[in-house]
Image (cartoon, helix red, strand yellow):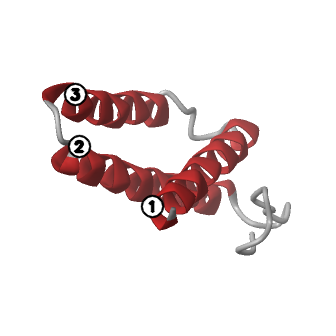
């Protein structure tokens, strides 16, 4: 994956365990962003909205089978896109 690449590209020779580690790291990064947005929310509804995203992400991450490489890559793509969107919103 490059900064300008819209999708995660993982060669077939990369072990699935490494892909899983990437998934966990990406989820942790996104979760931290959601926590920060929750902490910075101006209203209680805003705080609940972002905290709900933290919980949903946790549940989504935990539902991924450790042997399901295709789902891991799909989630990596989705979560990476979300991180990019949040970055773009922050930059204005």
Q: Residues under labels 1 and 2: Cα distance?
A: 14 Å
Q: Position of residue 76 (x, y in %)?
A: 63, 50
**Quadrant in the rendering for residue 16:** bottom right
Q: Position of residue 78 (x, y in %)?
A: 65, 43
Q: Which residue is mark 2?
A: 38
Q: Could you classify mark 2 by the number of other residues whose Cα lies within 10 Å: few (under 14), some (14-19), or many (20 or more)?
A: many
User: Residue at the location (55% across, 33% down)?
Assistant: 64
Identify the disc placed on residue 71: none
User: Residue at the location (32% across, 55% down)?
Assistant: 32
Q: Is residue 53 left or right of residue 26?
A: left
Is residue 77 visible in the rendered image? The answer is yes
Q: Is residue 61 left or right of residue 19?
A: left
Q: Position of residue 52 (x, y in %)?
A: 30, 27
> Could you tell which of marks 1 and 3 lies nearer the N-terminus?
3
Q: Secondary structure at mark 3?
A: helix
Relative to residue 50, is residue 6 depicted above or below? Answer: below
Identify the disc placed on residue 48: 3
Q: Which residue is mark 1?
A: 90
Q: Secondary structure at mark 2?
A: helix
Tell me whether circle 1 and circle 3 mark residues in contact (CB < 8 Å): no
Quarter holding the N terminus is bottom right
Q: Secondary structure at mark 1?
A: helix
Q: Nearer the viewer, mark 1 or mark 2?
A: 1
> Could you tell which of marks 1 and 2 lies nearer the N-terminus?
2
Relative to residue 30, is residue 61 depicted above or below? Answer: above
User: Residue at the location (43% across, 52% down)?
Assistant: 30
């Amino acid at each position: 994956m490059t900064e300008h690449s819209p999708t995660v590209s993982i060669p077939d020779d990369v072990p699935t365990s490494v892909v899983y580690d990437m998934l966990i790291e990406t989820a942790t990064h996104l979760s931290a962003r959601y926590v920060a947005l929750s902490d910075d929310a101006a209203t209680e509804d805003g705080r609940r909205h972002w905290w709900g995203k933290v919980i949903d992400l946790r549940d989504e991450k935990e539902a991924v089978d450790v042997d399901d490489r295709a789902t891991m890559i799909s989630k990596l793509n989705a979560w990476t896109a979300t991180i990019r969107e949040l970055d773009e919103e922050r930059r204005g």
